[in-house]
Amino acid sequence: MPGAPRTQATLHGGDAEVWTWKKRVTGTCSCKEPRKAVLLSVNGTELPARRERDRFSALVPLKEGKNHIVAYCREGDRGQCRSNVITLTQRLKSRPAARIRASIDAKRITLDGGDSSPSEATAAPIVKYLWRPRKGNPARLTIHRPPNPGTAHRVVLTPPDVDGEYYVSLKVADADGSADKATTYFVVEDGRPRLIEWETENPAWVDSAVVYGVVPHNFGRHGFRSVIERLDSLQDLGISAIWLSPSNATPSRGHGYAVTDYFKLRRDYGTKADFRRLVKEAHARGIRVLMDFVPNHSYLHHRYMTHAQKHGKASPYYHFYDRDESTGDPTHYFHWRYLPNLNYHNPEVRRWMLEAFSYWVREFDVDGFRVDSAWGVKLRRPDFWRHWRRELKRIKPDLLLLAEAGARDPFWFTNGFDAAYDWGDGLGKWSMERVFTGRDRIVPRLHSALTNQGRGFHRDALVFRFLNNNDTGPRFITRHGLGMEMVAAAMLLTLPGLPCIYTGQEVGAEFEPYRTLGPISWEDRNGLRDYYKKLISLRTKTPSLRSRHWEPLSVNSPHQVYAYARYAAPQDPALLVVLNFSPESANPELTLTERSQSFAPPTTLTDLLRDGQVHTALADKSVIRLSLPGLSARILGQSKP
């Protein structure tokens, strides 16, 4: 009929990036015939939509890259009505997933890749299985090749008899040529192989690691290149891993926690080629590289949030953000209004973050992550972290996963992480924040912090220890002086846990990370560097100092003296660490525990820190008397004959 309104169909949401292989598409159709079918064309393939009156929806499969979608309904002899075209850009890569199961018996180790799965996008069958031992294993691995190497998903290894960690990778490829790689490892102890406790066990390198916190813009004006220039210095210091402050794209020259793209880098730090070179140069020096990653929130002006703010519920990114149930406003923590929380109940957000983390492992071979505000994701979606660990450790099992969260909470050590922060009971509050203020109560406050107020820690707890980090404000040396810094440094590097030295700490640099946007001075005015170097060397070379075993000792002294025994195993001789936090000389009496009495001290002990002899007096076999200068530390071992 002339003048009759033409039927219209409209697809909602508009063009968008997606992080799923199947996306629900919705729209409206004004066709007056309620039984008239609505169809979708997805990249030229026709699919039916489910229609309820004037609304329709369909769950559509997507391919890698751009997906063009249009809706239409047929109008008899008048042809058909077509909707607007929307383009969904798939951000996921089509690849199979390599997975390895390991089993061990008395005569063989079996590795099975049969649980590897085809690409979610194409379901193309896996046609190749390529097994390869990693370079640097403690001894050569003998892989018994099956009759059809390259197509067999199972291989058998002869158990090696040299102790250490053994890594083997599996690369799978599908009929379309897409590939994926996974790695597994097993441990040989006392000549016998064993499997790994994947949920809780950390790689061996972590047990002897000393982490160095790197703020690239404090290293120099050339970001990653300035860090590369100081790698030789860090290697000489004895550092085994660097923790880079947030390096993803950000709009400001600040510390970088306002992320605008998780797959790009800060322009002021350099290019991806610069970053790749940094990782390669660090690895060449035996230094691992950790990224500071920010999965709890994005920047307010991230393109997803900007679109959601402009279009409200019509935006495909509206539900990418956690929202207040009553107002619909994005949630945030503290005063961080510019850092809206991500919505981890949305599977697209979970996949987005998994892909972001794994991208830097796959493409740049990074060695782990310090996960910013990990506690925030736990509050909203605690089960995410276990799944995240499994996926990352599937790709590279010797990653270090560090939670910015308190180590007093046992959750972290059974739900995804290898280590957590030395915090007290409050978020972001260093457990020793008030220990060194006022000189008359240092020892009881310190003991309370180190023993979790007497409650102890989870048996798998690895505590990330520090004197300085990005959140501690003025540097420890600024607040407490050189003498106290030296005693506290000896404590830091002789306690169980994962010690961290932060940008410039080893030279006594005085600055505040959030306020200092340019290079710091690297002048070592107090000769601290050699002191730190000696402490790090002792920790690295002495099993007792890097083990998880320690015992606080009873100390009889009017001064602020704290002492503990360190040992690697029950049969090993103990070391004694004695710390005098008082400016006055002290003559403490140390009461040895039953375990530390195996120390059996003679009248003269060796101070491993000062390379000198220390004369002691024995009241009986369980009590030692010695003298300590003010603000000093001793690391005491048996005197050599």
Image (cartoon, rainbow, N blue to C red):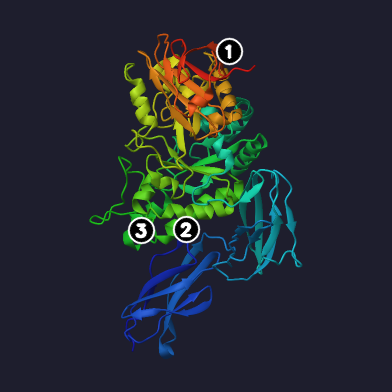
For discs 1 and 3, the disc positioned in front in the rendered view: 1
Seen from the viewer's position, the closer of residues 128 and 191 is 191
| Residue carrying label 1 | 612
Residue 453 place in picture, x, y as percent: 33, 33
Q: Do labels 2 and 1 touch, CB within 8 Å?
A: no
| Residue carrying label 2 | 351
The three-letter code of the residue at mark 2 reads Arg
Seen from the viewer's position, the closer of residues 519 and 573 is 573
For discs 2 and 3, the disc positioned in front in the rendered view: 2
- Which mark is on residue 50? none
Quadrant location of the N terminus in the rendered image: bottom left
- The image quadrant that residue 81 belongs to is bottom left
Q: CA distance from mark 2 to mark 3?
A: 16 Å
Q: Give the crowd class for mark 1: few <14, some 14-19, many >=20 residues within 10 Å.
A: few
- First in residue order: circle 2 vs circle 3: 3
- First in residue order: circle 2 vs circle 1: 2
- Which mark is on residue 318? 3
Badge 3 marks a residue whose secondary structure is helix
Residue 570 place in picture, x, y as percent: 53, 34
Note whether residue 213 is visible.
Answer: yes
Residue 483 place in picture, x, y as percent: 45, 14
Q: CA distance from mark 2 to mark 1?
A: 57 Å
The three-letter code of the residue at mark 3 reads Tyr
